Amino acid sequence: MKNYCTLFLIYILLSSFGLVEAQDMGNYNYNRANSTQATAAEEVRLQPYIMNDSTLVINAKLLFNIRPTEQVAIFSLVQSGKTLDNCHELMNSRLNGFLNGLTQMTISTEAIYIDVISQVPTFEYEIEKKIFSRTANEVPTGFELKKNVHIRCKNDSQTFDKIMILAAQQEIYDYVKSEYYLSQNQYTAVSDSLRNEGIRIIEKKLNQFKKLGFTTTENLAYKTFSEDFDLVDPHKRYQSYEAFNNTSNLKRNYKNQQDMEKSKTFYYTGVSYTDYDLVISPIVLEPTLQMAYQLQVRYVFKRK
């Protein structure tokens, strides 16, 4: 029992030393400092650790920042027309111009998919004037057609810039999002690397505990292990803020005031490194896929 208590205290001390992230203040923090939602201290999360007089659980948590090999970009098109034929004709003209430009970029037709979203009639109100009243009647005005274009391409900034320019030339301005993917070989290599590193970390912790006289072979009834993978897409890790400073004292003198619309800025922020024993490729220059891995070994000892 004494060995378990000593191990518990040492493990907490070791867990308190981890990777630390630092950055300059920036406008994001300036905005938070002037916000009522800003807090003096962020919540601290401790690594999961379970121990009693017969059970010991040791975790290895790892994170791998991976540059995606491919992406699927989605662009949205909206077209209105007086008639259904006119609506499709205008849509196809824009769409064919966009597709021809993609073909010239050596993007094959197999890497492009057209997703039809909706085809609905449009209405507006027509005012009917009478002697003693006015009535607003809803009347049809035409049709609205929506389609999405899915484009599979390499994760390359120059290639994507050309696609954005082609889209703008065809009056396609709604870039919805990009989904990022790994090749099967890359996914297998990354997962195998994380598993091997997780095993190494578990073995290292056990070897360090042996210096304290602790052993997992004495009175061991059985042991089990489990693992978990999680892949975080970069488009889910964007946050927004508004950078401005309002020093006017008008709000103290006027009950009603009309504020200007502030432009929102978006930025990428990856998963925090706080809870991880090891981060592979920790310095991130561009948005990346982040694969998290946890290996857990559970030792159950015979009760004395």
Image: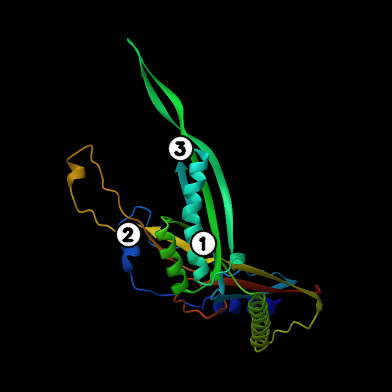
Q: Secondary structure at mark 3?
A: loop
From the image, which quarter does the C terminus lie in? bottom right
The answer to which of marks 1 and 2 sits earlier in the sequence is 2
Q: Where residue 27 sits: x, y (%)?
A: 31, 65
**For residue 24, what is the image quadrant?**
bottom left
Q: Nearer the viewer, mark 3 or mark 2?
A: 3
Q: Is residue 122 left or right of residue 69?
A: left
Q: Secondary structure at mark 1?
A: helix
Q: Quadrant of residue 250?
A: top left
Residue at point 42% right, 57% down? Answer: 170
Q: Of the two numbered discs 3 and 2 on the same chain, state the one appearing first in sequence.
A: 2
Q: Nearer the viewer, mark 1 or mark 2?
A: 1
Q: Quarter of the image containing the N terminus?
A: bottom right
Q: Which residue is mark 1?
A: 99
Tell me the CA gap for discs 1 and 3.
25 Å
Q: Where's residue 249, x and y in %? A: 18, 48
Q: Judge by depth and name the residue closer to the eye, 220 or 153.
A: 153
Question: Eyeballing the image, is 206 above or below 264?
Answer: below
In the rendered image, which residue does mark 3 sit on?
Answer: 82
Bin the neighbour count of mark 1 within 10 Å (Cα to Cα): few under 14, some 14-19, many 20 and up: some
Q: Which residue is mark 2?
A: 31
Task: Give me the disc on residue 209.
Answer: none
